[in-house]
Image (cartoon, rainbow, N blue to C red):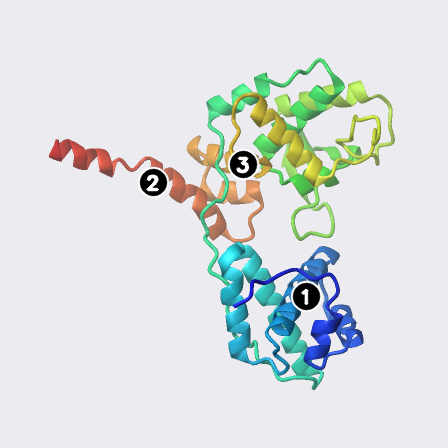
């Protein structure tokens, strides 16, 4: 079976199953989803229609979708396979609703996605080493230190850091908080508490920046080409990765998302409850938070040593 390849324009492949480009566009206009999701679905359907064209399939069946899924599994991550099959399911659900083609994808499952963390967390010792390695005498260093401290204590995602504005640092009760626009949220309704050390780091950075509009991004670029512009999620990830490498933590499993894992793990290890950790990480389902607890429980399970002591 031919390997699935990417094609930029789906027109030819669409025509092979009697679906015009106009109807293809109509499908995406019909979907109520964010632009990023739409782009993901487009990539998925281009792959699918390319697969049909390569295999001379003019009237796709349920079996063809299953074969497409199995071929994807050969060299694609489970999350990618899942996304592609979701897109195919949505498409054929729509074709049936419009009377264009029967829904041959109904109830077809994607790929089993492991609930285990794909990234590692940092130990307390490692966190201290990273923070100590950041030069806080420069504007860039002050910014990077503040980002690290914020993400480590608040469990922030890179998108939440990127979206933050200076005006989002506000007083609440007797403390200071940062209002954030969380994953899947349209507004900045969530907040994280800024402990004294983190607030100090942010204030120190903002003092070095100087007077700017409060609607300006909280963390901005310091490079000559994009100075003052909002940091992108990719840039933030790069900043985190670079500082990790500088102190010798160069691993594919240590990334910006590791800081979020670190926050959840350290909170549980130091007396935080499961519910408190769920609230900290803003998990909609507590089962997601349970993964952190399972890791900690397994680490403290010394079964192997007890067995070894009995045998040797």
Residue at image coords 65%, 49%: 183
| Contact, mark 3 vs mark 2 (Cβ under 8 Å) | no
Residue carrying label 2: 298
Nearer the observer, 42 or 202: 42
| Contact, mark 2 vs mark 1 (Cβ under 8 Å) | no
Residue carrying label 1: 46
Quick one: SS at disc 3? helix
Task: Mark 2 vs mark 1: give the one in front.
Answer: 1
Is residue 179 visible in this depiction of the protein? Answer: no
Q: Is residue 43 above or below residue 311?
A: below
Task: Mark 3 vs mark 2: give the one in front.
Answer: 3
Q: Give the mark nearer the N terminus: 3 vs 2.
A: 3
Residue at image coords 35%, 40%: 297
Question: What is the C-alpha distance between the residues marked 3 and 2?
Answer: 19 Å
Answer left or right for 73 relative to 299.
right
Task: Mark 1 vs mark 3: give the one in front.
Answer: 1
Category of crowding for the residue at label 3, using alpha-carbon neighbours closer than 10 angstroms: few (below 14), some (14–19), many (at least 20) = many
Answer left or right for 311 relative to 45.
left
Q: Which mark is residue 37?
A: none
Residue carrying label 3: 258
Residue at image coords 70%, 84%: 100
Residue at image coords 62%, 83%: 59
Q: Residue furthest top?
A: 137
Question: What is the C-alpha distance between the residues marked 1 and 3?
Answer: 33 Å
Quick one: SS at disc 2? helix
């Amino acid at each position: 079976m031919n390997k699935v390849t990417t094609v930029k324009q789906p027109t030819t492949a669409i025509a092979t199953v009697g679906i015009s480009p106009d109807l293809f566009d109509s499908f995406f206009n019909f979907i109520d989803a964010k632009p990023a999701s739409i782009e993901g679905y487009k990539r998925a359907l281009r792959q699918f229609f390319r697969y049909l064209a390569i295999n001379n399939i003019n009237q796709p069946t349920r079996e063809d979708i299953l074969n497409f899924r199995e071929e994807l599994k050969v060299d694609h991550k489970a999350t990618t396979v899942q996304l592609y099959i979701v897109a195919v399911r949505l498409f054929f659900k729509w074709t049936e609703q419009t009377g264009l083609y029967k829904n041959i994808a109904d109830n077809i499952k994607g790929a089993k996605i492991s609930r285990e963390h794909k990234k590692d967390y940092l130990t307390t010792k490692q966190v201290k080493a990273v923070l100590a390695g950041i030069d806080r005498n420069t504007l860039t260093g002050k910014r990077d230190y503040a980002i690290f401290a914020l993400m480590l204590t608040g469990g922030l995602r890179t998108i939440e850091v990127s979206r933050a504005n200076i005006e989002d640092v506000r007083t609440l009760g007797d403390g200071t908080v940062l209002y954030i626009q969380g994953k899947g949220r349209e507004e900045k309704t969530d907040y994280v508490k800024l402990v004294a050390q983190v607030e100090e780091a942010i204030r120190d950075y903002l003092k070095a920046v100087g007077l700017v509009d409060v609607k300006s991004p909280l963390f901005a670029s310091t490079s000559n080409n994009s100075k003052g512009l909002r940091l992108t999620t990719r840039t933030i990830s790069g900043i985190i990765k670079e500082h990790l490498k500088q102190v010798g933590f160069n691993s594919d499993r240590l990334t910006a998302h590791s800081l979020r894992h670190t926050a959840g793990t350290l909170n549980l290890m130091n007396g935080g409850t499961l519910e408190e950790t769920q609230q900290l990480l803003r998990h909609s389902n507590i089962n997601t938070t349970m993964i952190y607890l399972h890791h900690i429980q397994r680490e403290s399970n010394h079964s192997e040593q007890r067995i070894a002591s009995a045998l040797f």
